[in-house]
Image (cartoon, rainbow, N blue to C red):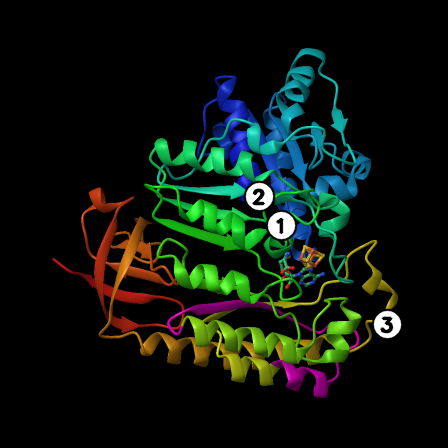
Amino acid sequence: MNKYDSERIAGLLCKYKAQYEENTQNADVIVFNTCTVRESADDRLFGQLGNLRGVKEEKPDLIIAVGGCLAQSYGEKLLLKFPQIDIVFGTHNIERFPYLLKSRILTGNRVIELKNESTYDISCLPSSREKSFSAWVSIMHGCNNFCSYCIVPYVRGRQSSRPSSQIIKEVKNLVSSGVIEITLLGQNVNSYGKDLADDLNFPKLLKSLSEISGLKRIRFITSHPKDFNSETIKVVAESERLCNHFHLPLQAGSNKVLKDMNRGYKKDKYLRLTEEIYNMIPDASITTDIMVGFPTETEKDFLETLDVVEKVKFDNAFTFIYSPRPGTKAIKFNNNFSHKEKMNRFKRLVEKQTSISQMKNDRLIGKSFNVLVEDFSKKDKEMLMGRTKTNKIVNFNGDSNLIGRIVYVDIISAKAHYLIGKLKL
Ligand code: SAH
Ligand code: SF4
């Protein structure tokens, strides 16, 4: 979601003839579009601001702006704590950023603007996209779920779905400009449309989008087990264009912890859903988010999480240690078990998942897949990097003119987090 917003901020700046500068030392304006979902994200920003203090002393005309979720949460406090910041703008003020920048340049005064809700649709702002062939499409903003650990509903506001007609129009325009892959974005895509009178639900939206000719791949994140249903699996199973990858955050395997997290589902329901996915789409991949160290999690609860990991055999998992967030309900729980114990659970979880990821990737050796070539590989600049429909990263040798195209690749070896392939000629 932040990447999506950043593309809009860049799009607005480009509209006013700004140019992208790779090296921050040479930039006239530095914009941080921040996350605040865990304390580590806050710390990263504070570290970067610390590094820029000296740069700003040498170059007083440098303008530093901080937007996004952390800005929405900290507000005025940022200006008080960091004299090097010139502009603070919230998650609902992105379209105003060029005006705030102009005001800072013309008056020399520091500026702050924070609204509690949006009065415009960010999707209508110009966008400066990273890739010409692939695009994010936000289908809804905000979240109503109030999971007890999560700051997102406080910094992003209530759920607001975009009318399906607008989304379909945007996707058609993207396709006519050369986009072949879209990723639909929302904090809980399965509850899409519940706040709209008389519009499509999520599976019906997927179906309509899958009928747009020229579009090759449709992805969506994030699914929420509470609202995820068979109708969605069925639509994905029926369309070649809908990618057979589901990101279905588990968070925890124990019913007690899930209840304390206010997740709205139990372990059994989660297991049933994943079983249904594998039954209807045997080659589907399932990835997840898991958190350890929630304040009420005991060793027994943690073993329930490992049990789900073992049973579902996720292709990959994003793993986190619980981080207390100001203003959230989970703050009221005593967070008194030791850091050492949390690290121990985290390590055991990562070890188990890594061996499962390796085992699942090993099974793909000898098979061939359609791969959308995205870029050069991060690991080896001589190689290309692409993704299968199941969202597996594949590195292989090939010419850079393949970037943006779908090619056929044989898998020759596998690591836990990526595959190595050979271009089929
Ligand atoms: N809307 C998505 C997730 C958005 S946040 C969903 O509900 O699945 C992405 C992930 O960050 C979450 O799935 C969760 O695992 C993690 N996360 C959120 N708040 C956190 C916190 N306070 N501490 C640690 N991890 C957190
Ligand atoms: Fe946060 Fe829960 Fe909403 Fe996801 S669904 S953004 S975890 S409150």
Disc 3: which residue: 334
Query: Residue placed at 38% from the left, 80% from the top?
Result: 359
Q: Which residues are magenta?
A: 282-305
Query: Residue placed at 48% from the left, 34% from the top?
Result: 170
Label 3 near label 2: C-beta < 8 Å? no
Q: Percent from the top left, x then y, of residue 25?
A: 50, 32
User: Which quarter of the figure is the C terminus placed in?
Assistant: bottom left
Disc 1: which residue: 192
- Quarter-wise, where is residue 145 in the image? bottom right
- Within 10 Å of the Cα at label 3, are there few (<14), some (14-19), or many (20+) other Cα atoms? few
The answer to which of marks 1 and 3 sits earlier in the sequence is 1
**Circle on res. 351:** none
Disc 2: which residue: 139
Under mark 2, the amino acid is Ile
Task: Give the residue furthest to the top.
Answer: 106
Label 1 near label 2: C-beta < 8 Å? yes
Q: CA distance from mark 2 to mark 1?
A: 7 Å
Relative to the observer, which residue lies in front, 65 or 180? 180
- Within 10 Å of the Cα at label 1, are there few (<14), some (14-19), or many (20+) other Cα atoms? many
Q: Is residue 294 magenta?
A: yes
Establish whether ligand 1 lies closer than 8 Å to the Cβ of label 2: no
Query: Residue placed at 55% from the left, 80% from the top?
Result: 309
The answer to which of marks 2 and 3 sits earlier in the sequence is 2
